[in-house]
Image (cartoon, helix red, strand yellow):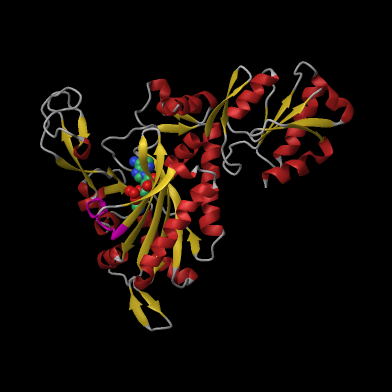
Amino acid sequence: MTENLMDKVVSLCKRRGFIFQSSEIYGGLANTWDYGPYGVELKNNLKRAWWKSNVYERNDILGMDSAILMHPMTWEASGHVHNFFDLKSDCKNCKRRFKSADLKDKAHCPECSGELTESRPFNLMFKTHQGPVEDTSNIIYIRPETAQGMFVNFLNILDSRHPKLPFGLAQIGKSFRNEITPGNFTFRTREFEQMEIEYFVRPADADRALNEWIEYRFNWYLTLGMKSENLRKRQHGKDELAHYAHACMDVEYNFPFGWSELEGIANRADFDLKQHSQYSGKELQYFDDATKEKFFPYIIEPSGGVDRAVLAFLVDAYHEEKVRDDLRVVLKIHKDLAPTKVAVLPLLRNRPEITELANKISRDLKKSFVTVYDDTGSIGKLYRRQDEVGTLYCVTVDVQTLEDKQVTVRSRDTMLQERISVDRLKEYLAKQLN
Ligand code: GAP
């Protein structure tokens, strides 16, 4: 199962409309993906759950949404222009490019055994020009992380909201990196979405805050139903740390291709505010009213990937079981993440009174839950389709409904069926879903 689990998930994603290859009709753009109708719901639910847990349920975090394009000095100050490199080697024969860290034999191409160039630094930022003139004075970078948008707004936040330490900023947004070796479906791509928190603390509190955030973020995945045996923490060695980090703990998921990073929780110390203060000439120190001290707060940064988390939840929820002689594929995904909560299925689509009533019921349910209506197959097929996309409840409308005003409600996880009166249906579903 694990061996081809990835293939099964990728195939389900395409077949059912979660994730498609980008620009597929033109042969596809390698390692770039589009989210289809179910994929976008899942992704939005995941982002909503993150926002709820990190912004709405806490008193110490404020939300933000900064621009993707930023003043080019930002990336000088942040160190990305000079330090955001991977070492790469090119094959002189087949012209393929490799990340040096991935090469066992640094001299020969792993594809064609051709001679490799010396490894050379390769900056991962996408560069373009702002405005109609393409010269060096107009160079602009497409952000490789959302974090900097929060650091450069530190002063605006202090002046407009007057938060007291410790406090944090949170944002979700697209980031771009010209990765040398993207791959593993949506795991490593050049365009991706991040969910980041920058949490400002007194330097003396940084170690404690780092540990608290590691636990808080680790548990978030568990509360959304991720299997604990598939989740672990891994401390970064000194040689792995990013140029700005004092310490970092990764939350890793046991993907079919191996344990890999879902999220990093780092202590960035006072690197960022000091750098931006120096490059901008603005005072970015925090003034503590109580002690009358001025200092650069330390920053604890939980930084996760939306696409990676979506992929991990899909892999984790994929489930196969034998039901009589059939194979049932079910996406046993947490109710808050499930793309669709309810499906309304008329049992006899050639009976207009039944489809009419089913339509009416679905229109009413749509006001309260994400609901789909489907009358395009036999009931067995319709159930299977809904199981595969993780729909929590199927409501079937049949001939009996016309008489007794009751529908059959079937649970995705137990497959148990209950007759519920149409009048009580909303209340019944609300109880299960909230
Ligand atoms: N601000 C810190 C920062 O960006 P990072 O470890 O480079 O740290 C944070 O990235 C998270 O962003 C990763 O844990 C991962 O989930 C996601 N991420 C990074 N690069 C990615 C890529 N090429 N494709 C998909 N997700 C990526």
Please name the residue shown 64% across and 34% down the image: 413
User: Start and end of the magenta stretch?
Assistant: 238-247
Q: Position of residue 114 (x, y in %)?
A: 12, 24
For the stretch drawn in magenta, the main secondary structure is loop
Q: Position of residue 106 (x, y in %)?
A: 13, 34
427 sits to left or right of 370: right
- Of residue 378 and residue 145, the one placed in the foreground of this image is 378
Q: Position of residue 117 (x, y in %)?
A: 11, 33
Please name the residue shown 73% across and 46% down the image: 431
Q: Is residue 241 magenta?
A: yes
Please name the residue shown 16% across and 32% down the image: 90
Q: Is residue 46 visible from the viewing direction of this image? A: yes
Dividing the image into 4 quarters, which one contains the N terminus? top left
Q: Is residue 21 magenta?
A: no
Q: Is residue 376 visible from the viewing direction of this image? A: no
Please name the residue shown 75% across and 37% down the image: 364
Q: Position of residue 3 (x, y in %)?
A: 40, 26
Position of residue 205 relative to residue 148, above or below, is below
- Of residue 197 and residue 406, the one placed in the foreground of this image is 406
- Of residue 65 and residue 331, the one placed in the foreground of this image is 331
